[in-house]
Amino acid sequence: MLLKQFFTGKIAHSSYILAGKTSCAVVDPRRDVDVYINEALAMGTAITHILETHLHADFLSGHLELAKKTGARIYAPASASCAFNHVPVSDGERIRLEDMDIAVWETPGHTPEHVTYIVTDRSRGDGPVGAFVGDVLFVGDVGRPDLFPDRSEELADKLYYSLHDKLLSLPDYCEVYPAHGAGSLCGRSLGAKRLTTIGYERAFNPSLQIKDKTAFISSLTTNMPSAPDHFGRCSDINRRGPALLSELPALESLTPPAFRSRMRQSGAAVLDVRGYAAFAALHIPGAWHIDLSGNFPTFAGWVLPPDQDLLLVADDYEEALEAKQWAARTGIDRIGGWLAGGMTDWALAGFETDRLGLLSVEDLHAMLTGHQTFTLVDVRAPQEYAENHIEGAVNIPTADLRTRWAELDRGKPTVVICSAGIRAGLGACILKRQGFREVYNVAGGMAGYSAAGYAGPCTVCVIPHGSRYFSNFIG
Amino acid sequence: MLLKQFFTGKIAHSSYILAGKTSCAVVDPRRDVDVYINEALAMGTAITHILETHLHADFLSGHLELAKKTGARIYAPASASCAFNHVPVSDGERIRLEDMDIAVWETPGHTPEHVTYIVTDRSRGDGPVGAFVGDVLFVGDVGRPDLFPDRSEELADKLYYSLHDKLLSLPDYCEVYPAHGAGSLCGRSLGAKRLTTIGYERAFNPSLQIKDKTAFISSLTTNMPSAPDHFGRCSDINRRGPALLSELPALESLTPPAFRSRMRQSGAAVLDVRGYAAFAALHIPGAWHIDLSGNFPTFAGWVLPPDQDLLLVADDYEEALEAKQWAARTGIDRIGGWLAGGMTDWALAGFETDRLGLLSVEDLHAMLTGHQTFTLVDVRAPQEYAENHIEGAVNIPTADLRTRWAELDRGKPTVVICSAGIRAGLGACILKRQGFREVYNVAGGMAGYSAAGYAGPCTVCVIPHGSRYFSNFIG
Amino acid sequence: MLLKQFFTGKIAHSSYILAGKTSCAVVDPRRDVDVYINEALAMGTAITHILETHLHADFLSGHLELAKKTGARIYAPASASCAFNHVPVSDGERIRLEDMDIAVWETPGHTPEHVTYIVTDRSRGDGPVGAFVGDVLFVGDVGRPDLFPDRSEELADKLYYSLHDKLLSLPDYCEVYPAHGAGSLCGRSLGAKRLTTIGYERAFNPSLQIKDKTAFISSLTTNMPSAPDHFGRCSDINRRGPALLSELPALESLTPPAFRSRMRQSGAAVLDVRGYAAFAALHIPGAWHIDLSGNFPTFAGWVLPPDQDLLLVADDYEEALEAKQWAARTGIDRIGGWLAGGMTDWALAGFETDRLGLLSVEDLHAMLTGHQTFTLVDVRAPQEYAENHIEGAVNIPTADLRTRWAELDRGKPTVVICSAGIRAGLGACILKRQGFREVYNVAGGMAGYSAAGYAGPCTVCVIPHGSRYFSNFIG
Amino acid sequence: MLLKQFFTGKIAHSSYILAGKTSCAVVDPRRDVDVYINEALAMGTAITHILETHLHADFLSGHLELAKKTGARIYAPASASCAFNHVPVSDGERIRLEDMDIAVWETPGHTPEHVTYIVTDRSRGDGPVGAFVGDVLFVGDVGRPDLFPDRSEELADKLYYSLHDKLLSLPDYCEVYPAHGAGSLCGRSLGAKRLTTIGYERAFNPSLQIKDKTAFISSLTTNMPSAPDHFGRCSDINRRGPALLSELPALESLTPPAFRSRMRQSGAAVLDVRGYAAFAALHIPGAWHIDLSGNFPTFAGWVLPPDQDLLLVADDYEEALEAKQWAARTGIDRIGGWLAGGMTDWALAGFETDRLGLLSVEDLHAMLTGHQTFTLVDVRAPQEYAENHIEGAVNIPTADLRTRWAELDRGKPTVVICSAGIRAGLGACILKRQGFREVYNVAGGMAGYSAAGYAGPCTVCVIPHGSRYFSNFIG
């Protein structure tokens, strides 16, 4: 038995190859699957099984793509009623992979159809080596049960039993292979470590310390982080099977005039993925802006209309390609071209441009202590805002600005701040698109503001760089 | 806390980054260290600690190279008496890395100075998360105590206490981070899985089931695999600190005439790293041959004289560079050039060439059932030979052929067989260098012979391809 | 005006980008066209024109592929009657590209429909800067008029006028941009230099020194090199427009069992592209062998049946991909998979293998001076054979062996020799496929044999390495 | 004979390999020489000769580096009195390279010691094939004779004779291989085409049409473009031999705190190579800024103090490495580190930042037609300014701003404009470093301003994108 974990940043997703000597299973594959095919080939094993723990809400699965490319069979929970060709699995069933027994346990809670796959390596012993727990149990956290708003309590109740009656019946030494790590919105506060054990979580996982079921349910149905828009559509796409990547439009290189024609003729929206500073200084009027260095796929899935054609602005072709790949992972599929030559060529063509302000933390501090009148919008999550914020700042999380901009005065200078400058860059473009005239982002955000000594630190804040790994969720 | 494992094939070596939010430790780094530097940079963490569990016998450590490139401090067992600048650590000491406590436990046995580093993540709880056990405990095996031949029993005794009194005192849930995986000669039979837990090994590790100390010692001091020659020198080089990679000679591209001049003037030996078939058909007379696709670094360290200049024959420059890198990992440092244009250009120059025979398994079977007189040498390890072999085959493990060729009749046709053709290719070149005139390798080896139905299967045989991951040790 | 030449080795083909400030033309593009698209993008120019001088016989054109990807218009000789959408051009017409005038001159001879494009850069002066002469005039040679066997004299006559009345009317300073360089079979003996001038060729081109038309015709219709089989089909494919590369089958990685099943079920032939030494030692029985390091695409087009499915044996995936790309350039399109793990894994599976002999030049010399009876077949071109050969050697050029093997005694040992070992490798596999039992190749071939002092040198011999650039045609 | 040209953009430098069958010469190599070594290896030829036409003023030569790596001999003009080991060559001498005769002709004018190498390919004929003319003759231009200010007339006089009495004595068909193309400051207005012929230049080169010597001298000693600062030091460094690249400091990755410490402790200056928009929005106070996408090496050599340590700000490591390589080509050698994590991490650390304004062409037009008081500085070359400029704009070429800033009013808002935004970005940083408070760059520059219809076009303006190849000189 050999286990290999594949961690995909930003969506903070863990998938796995579980291999015997000549065949292997892929568990919860991401949409672009060449990484599994290449690894299996290097191992000299054929991919024969594809195991889905549940219908993922936060990214598109590669189950179908992988099955088409390898001929492997897909195993998925029977209760998911998947529309594609698969082997439905139910509680108590067993799957054999060479020396290994894989037991199916139904563990609803995060979603109704969720199962866990428990591996026993008969060549070593009859105890369970590890469990593919999907989104039921995480390092330091448990799966959130509130993604189906009117079923939160019911699912939290099921989750309680899935954990206490099922997973915690496993021995302490049993390894835990979750589908997500720090940065995922499928839990509240996942740890950075990517694997764990039943015994360690039994001892130290905060949610598992809440033995009272009512308290447990309450803790998981209140004050949960917002769920991005695409969480509402990915599950169903995964049930039906996403489009194959080869069916997505190719990424065309468009000169500035061709790019502008396409904008006008096809009504395509512009998505600018450059860094927040370059965007602030110079961009195409009306462009969306999601800095690729932050949690680009999650925000792309969250705020972009999935049924609109998009054209990219990037620093170069490689960056544009990378953006296209990330976007596809959360189902943003209609990216047809990019601006060859970037904004430099656009400006040379004499085409219209726009900009927004970018403040340093000193600038912001000076403004706050001066006499200027302006609105300060803190677009971080409420949990971050709760820990440290600037007096007078209004808290409207980034994606909420799409509707809640109406609470603000469009005529006043508006400063948008997040933890770093990345989410605020998106927030600022949302305001610009709504006609706010004088909009500012703050470089360094609350992290820089704190580091410069103007505010206390924030221990829960998400910071994309500095300690990049720790939470690359929100930026 | 974030843990990242780096597995280096062939030497089957696991090293680790243990990271906090802004700083990290590298545990048991390999000699070429850019992989750690790049990963730490990507994480946004500075490498501040370098932890050595012991003086590695089977590869050269990158501790010094990494310290020079990053400014990190090296922590090494006090009793190792390392000659370079370091922090000596002893039983019971603690190292702090942000939220993490790292306890030092002396765990002699595999080597006298061996320590284990036990990590507690204070941000999660006061129980130990995991242990960097170096070569004390492996997945399904324990470290071999017989590398210092006259101290085997003493070390096996210490190993018993290190395991039973120390490591097994850890809780079941504690993760185990060993320094090697399947294919390593630092144990007898390591599992393919790369991580494990205390509880799982307590329950299923065969060596840990031997509760009687005498039996334990006996089991680990008899019938152990041979230890390659470089195991006798690497520890001491690691104690002093290996040469920096930038100090090794550059890999010059030499035309056939320049290559031949260098052979003659400097007395450099030729090392041919191409596949065994190409070598069999055409090579430079007297060349060493170690097929790069097998366990090249181990055999290079084992059979090549470390103080001789070497010149490479490879298919292309990339392959030559790769061979140079692998060789450096086991201390074969004096590779100064490669034959540009390969054997094709050598032959075009009209220079002398040699060849050896390559039999198919059908050929071999026909010879065995015919009337031809020949010697059949099986160069696999005794353990492999014990499980399945051809009647009449003499068992002389590959490296032993360097001296034991004298047991064979130089005048008779000699067929060399291993499990695949890779070790036998090396064996064949050893015989050729000793003046054997008619030497054959067998393509596919015992694996092919068995697969073709001429012999029973071998479950312990090492097979480089087919199930590549399972044991890439010996090929 | 900017000119960029793209030289594609093996097929020894030169294509060009002729660029203005914002737009450019591609002249005689090869089939895989990304190289032009990327260069044009880097220049900031749009590809607007695709110019074909004639219907190429020796490779597939990328005109249609490039037009589909860029929207550029194809310009082709009216008399070619191309079946795809294009602008037909005739003598005396002019094409405008920014500051540049491109005059069309009909210059039949190599083919009936051939035109030359003469460029005048109006921004610099009214004299012609250079001429895209296709296959009419080369560096040190002229286009061969004998590709349409029954029209050789007629075309040679036309060629005389195209050269003397047309091209030589250009001023001495006018640059010459031919479609081929050394190694091409579209002439008899092209120079290594890749560009030239009208004046230099007027003074020193041997064919242009023959002022007498009859002598000129005679010199170009006798003793010409053989034309490969695909020369008889590529022109027509180019007239219709080749399949798009995206429509060719993908290169699947097949394990040995899957590979063998495919061989058996689909009747696919095996094409082994490894070096001749590795092939000699170990190959799949019945495999075709064309060493990728020689003129692979030309021999693939020459000897392989274009309508048969093929499976590749290569050292690794990159080599297999490269072989697939080269094969597509001469219209060998049906390559569907490659043997993952190569021959090492094939042998491990215990599957049947074959081999042939590989002699050193010393071995051959010893055989020749000994008493052994064998056939020696020299598979070089007659021109090479004429200059130096071994007494007693029969001259049958490589591709001719497909039919002329019948002249040889299948029961005798047969040694195949070429200039290096590459063509002879192909020759040897042809004999093996015809049931010759004992077949040998000679490593180093006549070049090595001469270099070792056993024979005089050959000044016209084609040698793939050593001076690789000089003629990479035949190997 | 085979000729291969290597064009290095930005410095617009052409170097060459002139190859026979087994050996070759490299003519006027650039400082980083692996490109020649790899190409020679691919050709199967050994580099045996290194030919220098003269002491280059505009870049550092790789003669010494290449000689050390290959053992080839350097040939250089005797009158250059080079300090390293070389073969001095004088008028009328001949160098033999296989079939080729290389005649040395002294052709002073651009520099006093300049020679031309004339190649005759004896295998084809006794007329000259081509001439390596260095900086004497270009496509559409001649070498400037004014780089030694007090010797301009003397050198122009010599140039006249070198051209008319020497080079123009060559036949029309002789090819011309110059050392520079469009974008070089070694002439006034070089053509984009990279090769030419004697006859074509005789007919159409504007400078060669001036038959009167006095007029010729006058035309080349008046209104010449400025010569960058490094032109005054490179010749002498080339005479002595530049430092080997392996002796330059490695590029360290520095976290923001380490970067800031280094700035403070070593007095290193910061060089920001990002795009002008990103720089405008956010940069380290006091940083130099040269946008890597423009003619970075020339401006780096021009304005940066060569004896100061430098630290880079770039978007990523690859960009930083690329900047280091470009800088080395013009002798900026002391780049020791780059800011890992870029400005995003710098801002997160709360460190001080600065910015400047970036106007769109609409903004500028509005300011010009409004009532605001500001200085408009046009930093293009006088030749560009002469053709089109905005009324009221002061013309101070970019590098001159280093001293001529004193002509401007530091207290007034100052708008800097060039053709695109790249040179103006450098100009703006120079003003900021001099204490100008309110400084603006204009995105798109005069090119965008014209394209938007606010001004007439400029035919001589240098535009980095759009038609990138045409002149990448100044940006």
Image (cartoon, coloured by chain):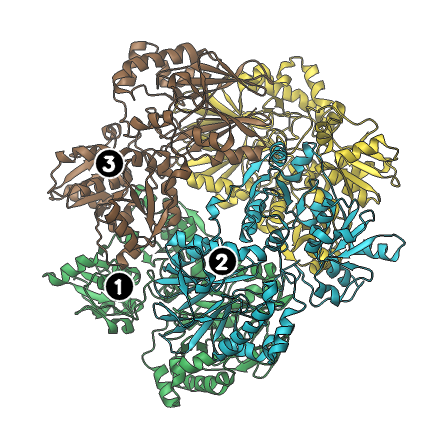
Chain colours: A brown, B yellow, C cyan, D green
The chain containing the residue under callout 1 comes to D
Q: Secondary structure at mark 2?
A: loop
Q: Chain of mark 3?
A: A
**Residue D447 tag number:** 1
Residue at which label 3 appears: A455
What's the amino acid at mark 1?
Answer: Ala
Q: Are marks 2 and 1 in contact (CB under 8 Å)?
A: no
Q: Residue at x 29, y 10 (%)?
A: A214
Residue A443 in percent (x, y) is at: 26, 44
Identify the residue at the far front of this view: C150
In the displayed structure, would residue D203 be above or below residue D394?
below
Mark 1 or 3: in front is: 1
Quadrant in the picture for the C terminus of chain B? top right
**Badge 1 element:** helix
**Corner quadrant of residue D335:** bottom left
Q: In which chain is the residue bearing label 2?
A: D
The image quarter containing residue A160 is top left
Mark 3 surroundings within 10 Å by alpha-carbon count, few (fewer than 14), some (14 through 19), many (20 or more): some
Q: Nearer the viewer, residue A222 or C126?
A: C126
Q: Residues within 10 Å of mark 2 (few under 14, many from 20)?
A: few
